[in-house]
């Protein structure tokens, strides 16, 4: 592909790549980095081999790059937590509901970042990009039954991770019981 082709590809598929990364990361700077990394990787792949499904390749790359960033962010936040740093959140219409939603979304992102790579990709492609089992199987070059198994395992692990994380209500109940 030529440079002119990539300008067209970026303009046509850029919004899809951005949405894919942002759904996982919910952070503008990380999404921008992921966006650039996705297209750079796509150019490198296109130089080595023929790309039949540009859209599928870009979604796959964006999902992979975003999961990598989640893992990196999780490691960094773990280090900050151990150092005693704390995060502040912006104000919204209902600060309590916003805080709960942000906490749940953060816990989900962190849990996705801890999933095995295949399970994380399948989960994100299915639920964040709304791809069918068949599309996921084709994109990841695995069988449809492998998609189902990976998705099931991902949901079980995520459910366990989210159930295992104590909520503020649980902490208050624990303090009252003491």
Image: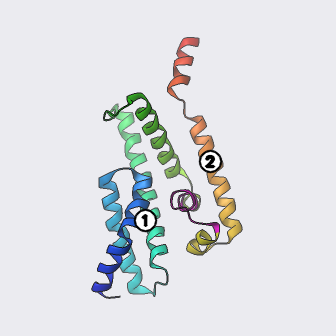
Residue numbers of the magenta segment:
120-133
Q: Answer with mark 2 or mark 1, whichever residue precedes in sequence.
A: 1
Task: Give residue 122's position: percent from left, percent from top.
Answer: 58, 61
Q: Compared to 61, does 43 lie above or below? A: below
Task: Tell whether position 66 is magenta.
Answer: no
Task: Give residue 129's position: percent from left, percent from top.
Answer: 51, 62
Q: Quadrant of residue 117?
A: bottom right
Task: Tell whether position 122 is magenta.
Answer: yes
In the foreground, 18 or 153: 18
- For discs 2 and 1, the disc positioned in front in the rendered view: 1
Q: Residue at x 49, y 73 (%)?
A: 56
Q: Residue at x 33, y 55 (%)?
A: 30
According to the picture, the residue beneath numbered tag 2 turns out to be: 157
Q: Compared to 86, does 34 lie above or below? A: below
Q: Residue at x 64, y 57 (%)?
A: 151
Report the quarter where the N terminus lies: bottom left
According to the picture, the residue beneath numbered tag 1 turns out to be: 62
> Is the residue marked by circle 2 packed among few (<14), some (14-19), or many (20+) residues within 10 Å?
some
């Amino acid at each position: 592909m030529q440079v002119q082709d990539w300008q067209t590809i970026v303009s046509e598929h850029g919004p899809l790549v951005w949405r894919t990364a942002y759904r996982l990361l919910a952070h503008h700077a990380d999404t921008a980095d992921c966006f650039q990394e996705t297209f750079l990787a796509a150019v490198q792949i296109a130089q080595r081999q023929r790309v039949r499904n540009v859209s599928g390749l870009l979604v796959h790359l964006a999902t992979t790059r975003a999961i990598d960033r989640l893992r990196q962010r999780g490691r960094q936040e773990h280090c900050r937590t151990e150092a005693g740093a704390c995060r502040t959140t912006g104000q919204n219409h209902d600060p309590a509901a916003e805080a709960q939603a942000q906490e749940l979304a953060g816990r989900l992102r962190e849990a996705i970042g801890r999933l095995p790579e295949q399970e994380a990709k399948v989960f994100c492609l299915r639920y964040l990009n709304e791809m069918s089992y068949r599309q996921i199987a084709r994109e990841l070059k695995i069988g449809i039954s492998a998609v189902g198994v990976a998705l099931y395992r991902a949901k079980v692990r995520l459910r366990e991770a989210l159930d295992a994380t104590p909520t503020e209500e649980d902490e208050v109940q624990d303090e009252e019981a003491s």
